[in-house]
Amino acid sequence: MRTALLALVLLAAPALAEENLTSMLSQDYLQITSNFNGSEITVFGAVENPSEHGIGNIVVVVRGPDTLMTVRRKDHIAGMWINSARAKLWLPSYYFIASNAPLGAIASSDTLSRYELGLSNLRADMVASDGDGAPYQAALVRAEQRAGLYRENPAGVETQNTAFRVHVPIPAAVPRGSYNVEVYIFRDGNVVSAQSTPFYVDQSGFERRLFEFAHDKPLYYGVATVLMGILLGWASTFFFRRK
Amino acid sequence: MEIYLPIAQMSVHWLIILSMGFVVGFLSGVFGVGGGFLLTPVLIFYGIPPGVAVATTASQIAGVTFSGVLTHWKRHSVDFKMGAVMIASGLVGSAIGVWLFAVLRRMGQAEFAISACYVVLLGTVGAIMLNESLRSFIARREGRSGYGRKPGQHHWLHGLPFKMRFRQSRLYISAIPPLVLGLIVGILSAVLGVGGAFVMVPAMIYLLRMPTNVVVGTSMLQVLFVSASSTILHAVDNFTVDVVLALVLILGGVFGVQFGVRAGAKLRGEELRLLMALLVLAVAVGLFYQLVVRPEDVYSLAAGSP
C-alpha cells in the first residue's frame, strides 16, 4: 500500500511540479565488522528548479527491513510479575525520520499517516492476544527508541540554498538486511517530489561466515564450539604449569 | 573496545565480558563449583538474550571443566563407573531440557521459568548449605568432629533394586538414585545453563554417601559431558550458542579459575561452605526481588524475536 503510494508519487511528481529532486547516499553498503560500534550514513541531495519560495520542507525517512516482533505484557499474578499477554507486530526493525521543521508543521496528520511519517504514524500488521494492539505498538516504539533503533529528528535536515544533507545514525545493534531511504519534498502540505534509494547492511566476511555456519551446519558448529572451549581450557593448564 | 557477537547480533564491551568470565571463574576456583548459576543471570542482566546466555554458558562450563577433570583423573579421584551411569541419564536429561526450553521460549515464559527455577533451587540449596555449615561450625567450636559418613547407617535408598558395585566410591547401591540425579542435572543444565554441581555435590555426599574425595572429580566428569551435550543440542535446536561470546568468557574463566584455586587453598573448608551458602542465597534473593518488584515497563520487546 505504502510502496504503491510512493510509486504513484514518483510517477506523478514531475507532472505536479517543475521541481526535480536528486539525492545520494554516502555509501550503499554498510558492513558490520567485529569491532562495529555504530556508524553513520549521510544522505545528501539537491532540489533542481526550486520555486521562488525556496526548497520547501524536506523529510527523509530511513526504514530497515520489516520483521515480526513480539511484545509481551507482564501482569501481577500471585505476587509476581509474569508475562501473560502478547502481541505480534510487523514493523521496520529500524526507523529514522529527519525533517527541517516539526512534522506537524509540514503536513496534516492525514497526509503524515498516509506516508507513515513519524513514529506515531507507523502502521503495523498485528495480532494482540487481548484484542487491543495499540499499547503494544507504543511499548515497542519506546523500547526501540531506548535501543536507538527508532529516532525522530525534526531538525535533522541541514539545508543550504538548494542543497540538503542528513546524517543518519546507525547504532551498533542495527539489524542486517535491506534498507530504504525515502526523500520527500513538501509544499503547502503536499508531496511534490519523492525519491527512494536502497542500501544494505550486512555482516563482514568473518562474522557472516560464523552466522551462516551456525545456521547451516548447527551440529558441526556446536561440536566446534565445545572443542574450542575444551582446547582453551586444556591449553590454560600448560600455561599455568610453566609459571 | 566493542566486539560484535554474530549470533546474539549485538555489540558488547569485551572487557566487561572478559571480567565477568574472570570473576565467575575465580569464584568457581575458590568454591569448586562451575559458576554457571552466577554467569547466566549476570549475562541476562547485562542484556544478552536469555536463550543465548543459557546456551553459551553451557559451552563455557564445558571448557572450564575440562582441565579440572584432567587434574582429578591424575589424582585418581574420579569414579568412572558412577560417572558413566550419571552421564547416560544426564544426556537424556539435557535433550529433554533443550526441548523444554524451546517450548518455554515459544510460550514467552523462558525468562520467568529461568528466574523462578533459580530462586527455588538456589534458595533451597543455599538454605541447606547454610544450615549444614553453621552446624559444623558450632560442632567444631564445641570440639566435636563435624559431619561425616556414619558407617552402618541404613537409608531407604538402600532398599531399591538394580544394585551396582561402585569400587572407587566403595559403595554397593541401586543404580536408580544416580540415574535420577543425572537426569535432573541434565535437565537443569539445558534449561538453566548451569553445570549443576551445586545440586549434584550435596546430593552425592548426603544422599548417595559417596566419599568426599571422589565427589568433585566425578561430578566434574558428568558436568563436562552434559554441558557439552547441552551446548550442541542448543546449537542445533535453538541456534543460540554464540561462539565469540563463549571464547571471551572461557578466556576470562580459565584464568579466573587458576587464581581462584590458589585463593581457595588459603581458606578453611567450613568458611568456604559458609561463604558459598551466603553467595548462593544472595543470588536467589536478588532474582526473587526482580520477580516481585513492579518492572519499570510492564511491556517488553522479546529479545531476539521471533
Image: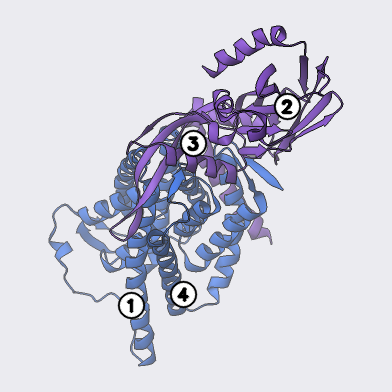
The residue at which mark 3 appears reads as A223
Q: Are marks 4 and 3 on the same chain?
A: no
Could you tell me if residue B222 is visible in this image? no
Which chain can be seen in purple? A
Q: Residue at x 33, y 36 (%)?
A: A131
Cα gap from disc 4 to disc 2, whole angstroms: 64 Å
Q: Position of residue B148 (x, y in %)?
A: 31, 77
| SS assignment at label 4 | helix
Amino acid type, mark 1: Asn
Amino acid type, mark 4: Leu
- The residue most toward the bottom is B142
Closer to us: B279 or B271: B279
| SS assignment at label 1 | helix
Residue at mark 1: chain:
B
Q: In front: mark 4 or mark 3? A: 4
| SS assignment at label 3 | helix
Earlier sequence position, callout 2 versus callout 3:
2
Residue at mark 4: chain:
B
For this view, does B45 lie left or right of residue A205? left
Q: Residue at x 40, y 69 (%)?
A: B281
Cα gap from disc 1 to disc 4, whole angstroms: 12 Å
Residue at mark 3: chain:
A
Circle on res. B131: 1
Q: Residues within 10 Å of mark 2 (few under 14, many from 20)?
A: many
Q: Position of residue B303 (x, y in %)?
A: 48, 41
For this view, does B206 lie left or right of residue B22? left
The residue at which mark 2 appears reads as A58
Earlier sequence position, callout 1 versus callout 4:
1
Q: Position of residue B42 (x, y in %)?
A: 51, 56
Circle on res. B275: 4
